Structure formats: structure tokens, C-alpha cells
Amino acid sequence: METQQSPAAPWGSGALAPVCCSPDRDENCGRASRRFTVISKVRIEFIGFEAKALVREYVFTVRESAGDAREFTLTIVNEAFQHQRVRYQDAPDVCSVKLRRELELFANHPPTTHYRISDADLDEYRSAHAPRKARSPFARKPVEDF
């Protein structure tokens, strides 16, 4: 998959944005590619969080080029942190992934401004960001049968 500089990338200048050659197949590399929904001219900003008795609330604003800012609140239950299903430093990114998915799904206008991060969201994030197992340079080579 190719990447190109995105001149109006909402997440900062110099960011790389994915580019697909066709919706079904990428003619250049011959492998299936996903169709990307463009969140055009939208800026997502993390404002902060508030720790409450049962949840931590993460607040984001979304600004479109010709519109007012909308505020979105995403919550993660404190139990998820206590049982190490998510790390405190990863929580804003987990919420950002969920918010971007909702914006893509509803063409930048989701029906609600409050979302709860589910266990499935946490599992998906953890599997996507799991460290890869390093190969040992001293590992035995597999036996080949000739």
C-alpha cells in the first residue's frame, strides 16, 4: 500500500495518509486492500480526562473546517485499569481509535456524543498493539526432511 504526504492532515503536517489504488484490489501490489473513509478536514483534539468513582471520562473536541467544535466524551470503567486490561497511558489512544471509527462510520456526524469503551474495544486495541515476539538469534533451526 502506498503512502503520500497529506497536505491537510488533521493530525499535523508531515503525517502519512494511506492511499488505495482501487476499492477491491490494489493493482500495484496484487493484494486485497481496505477501502478508507476519509475524515476530510476534521481535527480531533484530546482535551483531558476526569477520574470519577466508577469511570474515567476522556473528553475530545472535533472541529470541521466550516463548523463549530463538537465535544465527545468516552468512558472507560476503572475496573479495566485495575485488572490491567488497559494501561493509563494507552487510554487516550484507545478512546481516539473508537472516536475515529465512529466518525468514519457516520460520515463525521455520529448520533451520540457519549461512548463507553467496551471489553471488545479493549481486546481489539490490545491485539493490534501487542508486541511482536522477538526471534532469538540462538534459536535452533527447524529440521528439514530431504
Image (tube, rainbow, N blue to C red):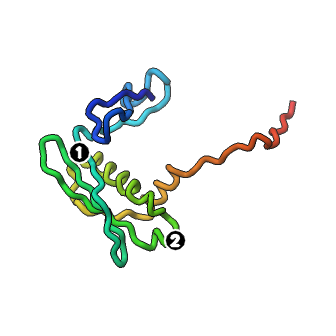
Q: Is residue 17 visible?
A: no
Which of pointers 2 and 1 lies earlier in the amino acid sequence?
2
Spot the residue most to the right.
Answer: 146
What is the residue that sits farthest to the top in this orientation?
28
Task: Report the residue at 37% width, 29% height from top.
Answer: 19
* Apparent side of residue 5 relative to residue 66 in the rendered image (left or right): right
Position of residue 126 measured from the top left corner of the image (x, y, whole percent): 50, 55
Read off the residue under disc 1. Answer: 107
Quadrant assignment, res 146: top right
Taking the spot 36% from the left edge, 72% from the top edge, the residue there is: 55
Coordinates of residue 106 in the picture (x, y in percent) = 25, 49
Whether residue 131 can be seen here = yes
**Residue 133, labelled with which disc?**
none
Distance in Å between CA atoms under marks 2 and 1: 35 Å
Q: Amino acid under label 2?
A: His
Q: Quadrant of residue 33?
A: top left
User: Crowding near pointer 1: few (<14 within 10 Å), some, many (20+)?
Assistant: few
Depth check: 98 or 46 in front? 46
* Amino acid on which the number 1 mark rests in the picture: Ala
**Residue 95 drawn above or below residue 20:** below
Of residues 37 and 5, which is closer to you in this image? Answer: 5
Residue 23: image location, x then y, percent: 36, 30
Q: Mark number for residue 83? A: 2
Q: Residue at x 38, y 57 (%)?
A: 92
